Image (spheres, coloured by chain):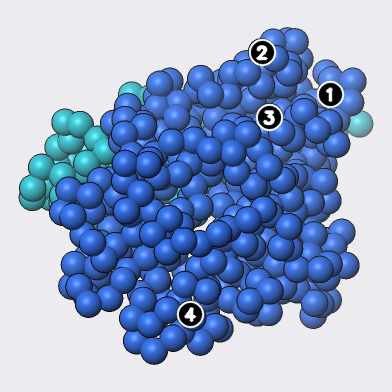
Chain colours: A blue, B cyan
Amino acid sequence: MKELRDKRVIRGLLSEIEKRTRELPSSSRIMEVCGTHTMTVHRYGLKNMLEKVGVEMVSGPGCPVCITPNEIHEAAIELVTENENFILTTFGDMTRVPTRKSSLQKAVPAAGSMVKIVYSPRESLEIAGSSPEKQVVFFGVGFETTIPAIALILREAVEKKLANFSILSALWIIPPPLKAIVKAKEIALDGFLYPGHVSAIIGEKPYQFIAKEYGIPGAITGFEPSDILLGIFSILNQIRDGNPTVSNEYSRVVRASGNPKALAVMEEMLETKDSYWRGLGLIPQSGLKIKKEYSAYDAEIKFNLRIKGGSGDLPGCRCGEVLQGLISPPQCPLFVEKCNPDSPYGPCMVSFEGACFVYYKYNPTIKNEL
Amino acid sequence: MCLGIPAKVVQIDKPNLGKVDYLGTRVKTNFELLDNLKVGDWVIVHAGFAISKLDEEEARETFSILREMAEKEALANKNKEREKQSNKQKG
């Protein structure tokens, strides 16, 4: 596996990429959809190296913590501050997202209530099993990579009839926002790097409309620097040949039809719904909710939460534009001085894969300014 | 959030539970999303669940493409060096 970070390999790939870009009439703009890709692109300095050879990388909507509208974060905060004997479990990043009602980390829970950070959704079930006197709500956020795990624990809760357990879901599907971005035509894109681990679940097919209907090339890509460059090389070849497709450059992990067991459990427990995404607004069939027959485990129904719309952004926060690739984080006036990882103003600066956080962490000139 | 870690299966207890080795640490992992897993397989682990089995043949193929890229680059550099040398000699 050493090839994946080998400097000689990276230099070789970059020079092949440069050969291709020289054959093209103009430079190419490629969106890395996934926040974990954004991390690789910046961590290994690929962003600047690629710019020198005529490839501009822009970040996309692939950060579930970031795209979850504030209304859902606020509903989670209310659950634990207004109800006694509640345990809200969630992933670490989620607790730091600032909203109009503070954050899960800073808000003061009601008597006997608390927020617990979990690494795996399964821990929430164990907590519910060992604390029968409390209501346990798993605030589950994620894309297709995480959703099968959440669907599995939902099924287990249903089988065990765990009456004190429910899920506040913020579950998002990746292809619909890509369609929204392409259709909006606010940013011209020459290619998409598709997220490797989302693709491990859904396979190649769900992206094909982007190549077929919109003529935009794309490559499913892994997370090492060589993986990213291989994906870009494939996209440039597709551009040169006038043959947009969905190439799989992460075939060691991604099968063409995805993971059938994961897809089956998602299908069994969840159904699609129209969802609000931060910045992108209402996107048809872009989210998943718990099926009606399991609504006893749906926190939104169980606790009658009326989560509305997606207009609750904090004033001045431009995370929504960052998520669409419309601006790059340094173009936000709050960036660095008023919004940084120590004191984040918006969610794109909170999450480890939020574009603002990544730009801050891996940009040496920013650190010099401080 | 979509971070997935390649790890080796070292223990399968119940049909769907076991442990993987990640850089020397044994981590409890759920194998329910994969079929026919055996000790010694490599998997991608995300949030405590193995979501995909690594295909070794595909991996070998990708790595050989990558090595080829590095060799091409090394060869091009060597040729450049030679050209420089011969230009110097001519000069």
**Mark 3 surroundings: few (<14), some (14-19) or many (≥20) residues within 10 A:** some
Q: Of callouts 1 and 3, which one flags the residue occurring earlier in the amino acid sequence?
A: 1
**Residue A281, located in which quarter of the rendered image?**
top right
Kind of residue at disc 1:
Arg
Dot 2 amino acid type: Lys
**Disc 4: which residue:** A82
Crowding at mark 4 (Cα within 10 Å: few <14, some 14-19, many 20+): some
Foreground: disc 2 or disc 4: 4
Where residue A287 appears, as percent x and y from the top left, is: 53, 41
For label 1, the SS is helix
Q: What's the CA distance linking mark 1 and mark 2?
A: 26 Å
Q: Residue B42 at x, y = what percent? A: 27, 40
User: Which of pointers 1 and 4 indicates the residue nearer the eye?
Assistant: 4
Task: Name above or below for residue A273 compared with residue B71.
Answer: below
Check if mark 4 and mark 3 are on a common chain.
yes
Q: Secondary structure at mark 3?
A: helix
Is A334 left or right of B6, judged from the image as shown? right
Whether residue A190 is visible to the viewer of this picture, yes or no, is yes
Q: Chain of mark 2?
A: A
> In the rendering, which numbered label is found on residue A212?
2
Please state if A219 lies on the left or on the right of A216 as rendered.
Answer: left
Mark 3, residue position: A179
CA–CA distance in space, label 1 to label 4: 61 Å
Are discs 1 and 4 located on one and the same chain? Answer: yes
First in sequence: mark 2 vs mark 4: 4
Q: Which is more foreground, mark 1 or mark 2?
A: 2
Give the x, y percent position of residue A63: 59, 52
Q: Nearer the viewer, mark 4 or mark 3?
A: 4
Disc on res. A132: none
Task: Identify the residue under disc 1.
Answer: A22
Instruction: Tell which tag, 1 or 3, sits nearer the viewer.
Output: 3
Q: Amino acid at mark 4?
A: Glu
